[in-house]
Amino acid sequence: MVAMLLVLLLVLILFGAGFALKALWWIALVVLVLWIIGFFARGTSGRWYGR
């Protein structure tokens, strides 16, 4: 749960900074998409924080 919150916090920080720097906005979007894909692709048994 802590790892999930840290990733979401990182995405929010990058997203907020992205209004000034468009590159960070795209990086934040890519990180979010990759995290969501990994979140659903592994299932609940593969997540070390989901036990």
Image: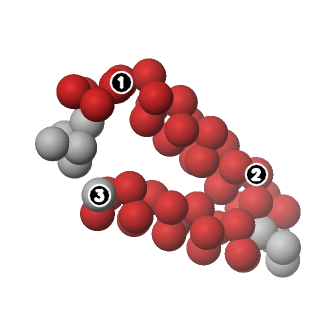
Q: Earlier in the sequence, mark 3 or mark 1?
A: 3
* Residue identified by numbered label 1: 42
Q: Is 48 above or below relative to 38?
A: below
Q: Secondary structure at mark 2?
A: helix
Q: Which residue is mark 3?
A: 1
Colouring scheme applied when the structure was drawn = secondary structure
Q: Are marks 2 and 3 in contact (CB under 8 Å)?
A: no
Residue 4's x, y, as percent? 38, 56
The kind of secondary structure element at disc 1 is helix
Residue 26, given in percent of the width and then of the height, sits at 76, 51
Q: CA distance from mark 1 to mark 2?
A: 24 Å
* Label 2 or label 3, whichever comes before in sequence order: 3
Q: Which residue is mark 2?
A: 26
* 21 on left or right of 41: right
- Residue 1, quarter of the rendered image: bottom left
Disc 2 packing (10 Å; few <14; some 14–19; many ≥20): some
Report how far apart the C-alphas of labels 3 and 1 lie in the structure: 15 Å
